[in-house]
Image: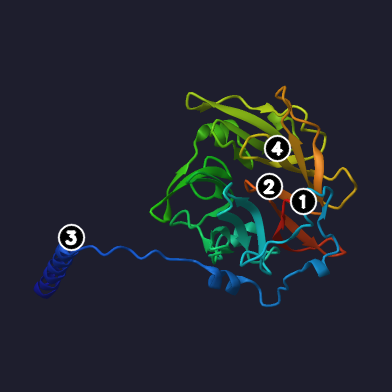
Amino acid sequence: MVSRVVKAVLAVVVIVIVLVAVIVITAPKEEEERVVIGQAERLAAIPTDAVQQTPDDDIYAPVIHYDAWAAPVPMPGPVTTAGAEDSPFITPNGTWFFFFFTPDVTVPANEQLMDGVTGIWWCQLVNGSWSSPERIVTCDDVSLDGAEFVRGKTMWYASIRADNYGEIDVYTADYEDGEWTNFENAGEQLNVDYDIGEFHITSDGETMYFHTAEVEFGGDMDIYVTHLVDGSWTEPEPVPGINTDGMEGYPYISYDGKELWYTGTSGLGYAGPAIYRSVLQSNGTWSTPVEIVSNFAGEPTLDADGNLYFVHHYFDAEGTMLEADIYVAYRQ
């Protein structure tokens, strides 16, 4: 039996809880301060013994094969570090830049989930200089996000998290009032029926190019295309003239829809992946792809001026990856 003292104590507790609830309900609500995970946190997470690589140290420096672009250089500004920057995307107007970051390339993905800094980062071009990068936090739970693509003020991205249809699902988010919000799964058709890999959507929003390695689509990493018709994506088809017995992936479509860029195996004998370009012909077909940048170069993205941004991975002579940086080859 509960004693009178205990009953009295419980009564007081109940009264306190009710009073607190009334105060919380009636008191004016303060806006929650947005927590910013920024450059200081990013740099602090990089191992103290990590060394930022430079072109002078690089035994596999990127090689460009056409004089329409200047020799590639590390992207200026605060993006590149001794950690790993990957999966770049720049908006056509050249003012928003997105990338994936993880502080240590030797750490497995399941551990990256918990480090608080691995994920999608972005910065903005302000008065000719890139702002300090910030991480885009996409949910209150743990997630591993990357492979971002932005059209207008909507970001599409891949995420490993609970409640996915599969291991990695595609999500969308909107930029509103200075914040990224409205995070939603892109749906069963893309994530289950087609199980798309990294992708790019044309500027009109009606055509998606993506890579996949699913057996039902041919077994190798190839590039496919699907069209948005009446709110649904059509059955994907391989892009004619692009896919080979090797690897083709990470597609990028220029803003005018006339250039298809992607990552593939070097056909010129260089180390690692290379960046290719194909041009849309007057008859609607794609030209024979041409290797533009070689030596561990991939995931191309361009601004409207034709400046080419891509990821470059540094390797030592034994084949160990050291880090990754974003490079740019300026259009001449």
Mark 1: which secondary structure? Answer: loop
Distance from the alpha carbon under mark 2 to that under mark 3: 54 Å
Q: Horizontal and vertical percent for residue 321?
A: 77, 62
Q: Quick one: which residue is furthest to the bottom in this view?
A: 48
Identify which residue is drawn at 72% across, 71% down.
52
Name the front one of labels 2 and 4.
2
Amino acid identity at mark 4: Leu
Check if mark 2's residue and mark 1's residue have beta carbons within 8 Å. Answer: yes
Identify which residue is drawn at 61% across, 50% down.
89
Q: Horizontal and vertical percent for residue 247?
A: 78, 40
Give whichever of discs 1 and 4 has the lower sequence position. Answer: 1
Q: Nearer the viewer, residue 194 or 70?
A: 70
Distance from the alpha carbon under mark 2 to that under mark 1: 9 Å
Give whichever of discs 3 and 4 has the lower sequence position. Answer: 3
- Dot 4, crowdedness within 10 Å: few (<14), some or many (≥20)? many
Q: Nearer the viewer, residue 86 or 220?
A: 86
Q: Quick one: which residue is furthest to the front in this view?
A: 332
The image quadrant of residue 44 is bottom right
Name the front one of labels 1 and 4.
1
Q: Horizontal and vertical percent for residue 156?
A: 53, 44
Check if mark 1's residue and mark 3's residue have beta carbons within 8 Å. Answer: no
The residue that label 2 is drawn on is: 306
Distance from the alpha carbon under mark 2 to that under mark 4: 13 Å
Q: Is residue 169 above or below residue 3?
A: above
The residue that label 3 is drawn on is: 25
Q: Is residue 258 above or below residue 141?
A: above
Distance from the alpha carbon under mark 1 to that under mark 3: 61 Å
